[in-house]
Amino acid sequence: MMKTIKGLIMGIQFFTSIPIPYAVPMDRDHIERAVRTMPILGLLQGAFYAGLLYILLHWTPFSPLAAAFFVWLAMILVTGGIHLDGWMDTSDAFFSYRDKDKRLEIMKDPRMGAFGVLSVIVLLSTRFLFIYESILHAVDTVYVLIMLIPFLSKSVAGVLLIKVRAAKEDGLGTMFKKAAGRYTLWFYPLYIAIVLAVLWLLQPQVLGGAAILVLMAGLFILFAARKAVKWFGGITGDVIGASIEGVEITLWLTLWLWLYIVTG
């Protein structure tokens, strides 16, 4: 149990900007626990975003536009932009239209190209639109669905990390991949089953939207797994970061469309 808690702490230290002054041993057992608890980390992030949105809309005088901005900003601050960095590096590499080896070299380059800048502008502006309009169409279930988005994005990242071959022999992504055991992924469907069971007991009206989000996350895994190998020869830390951003914007799009259908 303590190793699991320490693994979660390691995940928070690696994948967020939240300062936790606790040294977790960088051995295989703790890294494996960090991978195992990635969906839990996502669920905690989602609970924070949903809770912040609820507070802003119900306990402050802020407008929906201001509430959307603060939630949008919180998503950047909590992660420290680490996934956005992967999105920009991967975008620069992809839009270079070079071979796989050259794309990997481009991802290592600390300089940012025009495609990386343009892609992150499009990503962030689109996310803000989806957040704002989801708030305007907000129903009671929207908070739960928002909470599920980081939960599913971290689950997708864990699956890709474990199941897709590494593009190179070094790097953060490869380190986490090598630490994962044969049973690490068994916990992921268990997490999803527990979450859906809790929703069925407490808020059955949200199950339809939740099931659609889970389905879209699964489809994204199939797409990203194939394209990561085709475009980059496999996964890297940057590709995993880009995948997290990619699946989250896909799920925000799905939520946005679902709310239009539900609310008419």
Image (tube, grey):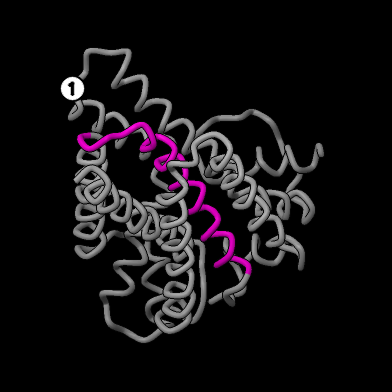
Horizontal relation, residue 137 to residue 247: left or right: left
Considering the numbered disc 1 on the image, is that residue within a helix, a strand or a loop?
loop
**Residue 99: x %, y % from top left:** 36, 86
Q: Nearer the viewer, residue 204 or 242?
A: 204
Horizontal relation, residue 74 to residue 32: left or right: left
**Few, some or many C-alpha atoms within 10 Å of disc 1 (few <14, some 14-19, many ≥20)?**
few
Q: Residue at x 65, y 65 (%)?
A: 177
Q: Residue at x 36, y 66 (%)?
A: 90
Q: Residue at x 51, y 62 (%)?
A: 237
Q: Nearer the viewer, residue 66 or 145?
A: 145
Name the outermost residue toward the bottom: 99
Magenta stretch: includes residue 149: yes
Q: Quadrant of residue 163?
A: bottom right
Task: Please tell me whether the stretch drawn in magenta is mainly helix, strand or loop.
Answer: helix
Magenta span of residues: 136-162
- The residue that label 1 is drawn on is 63
Q: Label 1 sits on what residue type?
A: Ser
Horizontal relation, residue 50 to residue 118: left or right: right
**Residue 184: x %, y % from top left:** 72, 60
